[in-house]
Image: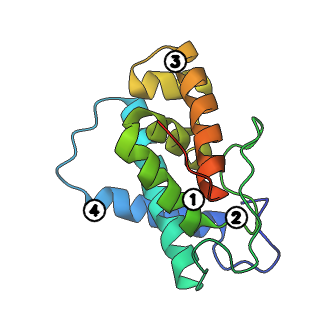
Amino acid sequence: MGRERPGHTLQATALVNEAYLRLIEVKHVRWQNRAHFFAMSARVMRRILVDSARARGNDKRGGGVRKVSFDEELMGLPEAGTDLVALDDALKALEAVHPRKSQVVELRFFGGLSIEEAGEALQVSSDTVKRDWRFAKLWLLRELRGERATS
């Protein structure tokens, strides 16, 4: 949340509180391990952030918002001005053709998990996560630029 614009309405503590409230509402989940909890937390935080962006009236694919940068050091929550609605749409498109690669982005970008933690959560090797992360970043950048991303 440190990269959010000044005066933003969603504070880190509010995000964590909302995520906690949503997670405890889910009674039927049998937590398999710590990694499963982090994966679910990342998904819940993604939903909260995207819902918040939609509520602020972000225009799909623009509205004066900067494009998303998927640098290696970009972890945790998105930078100020990131068009989360467009990112969410692109992630859904990626998920349709490459579900695990979409999960890697969700875990790393929204959940802030490391390569190793994401590998544990997905039960794959760190090398696989690195390949998926690299592919997903390029795929999403092309999708967000409006270029035709191929599988």
Which colour assignment does the render follow? rainbow
Q: Along the polypeptide, which appears first: circle 1 or circle 3?
A: 1
Q: For the residue labelled by badge 4, is the local secondary structure a helix, a strand or a loop?
A: helix
Residue tagged 3: 128
Residue at position x 54%, y 23% in the image: 129
Q: Along the polypeptide, which appears first: circle 1 or circle 2?
A: 2
Residue at position x 50%, y 40% in the image: 150
- For the residues labelled 3 and 4, the Cα–Cα distance comes to 33 Å
Compared across the picture, whether 123 is left or right of 15 comes to: left
Q: For the residue labelled by badge 1, is the local secondary structure a helix, a strand or a loop?
A: helix
- For the residues labelled 4 and 2, the Cα–Cα distance comes to 29 Å
Tell me which corner region of the image, top left, top right, bottom left or bottom right, holds residue 132.
top right
Residue tagged 2: 82
The reply to whether callout 1 and callout 2 are in contact (CB within 8 Å) is: yes
Q: For the residue labelled by badge 2, is the local secondary structure a helix, a strand or a loop?
A: loop
Tell me which corner region of the image, top left, top right, bottom left or bottom right, holds residue 105.
top right
Q: Quadrant of the N terminus?
A: bottom right
Residue tagged 1: 87
Residue tagged 4: 25
Q: Amino acid at mark 4?
A: Glu
Q: Residue extending furthest left?
A: 28
- Give percent across and percent down for residue 77: 66, 54
Q: Amino acid at mark 2?
A: Thr
Depth check, mark 1 against mark 4: the one in front is 1
Q: Along the polypeptide, which appears first: circle 1 or circle 4?
A: 4
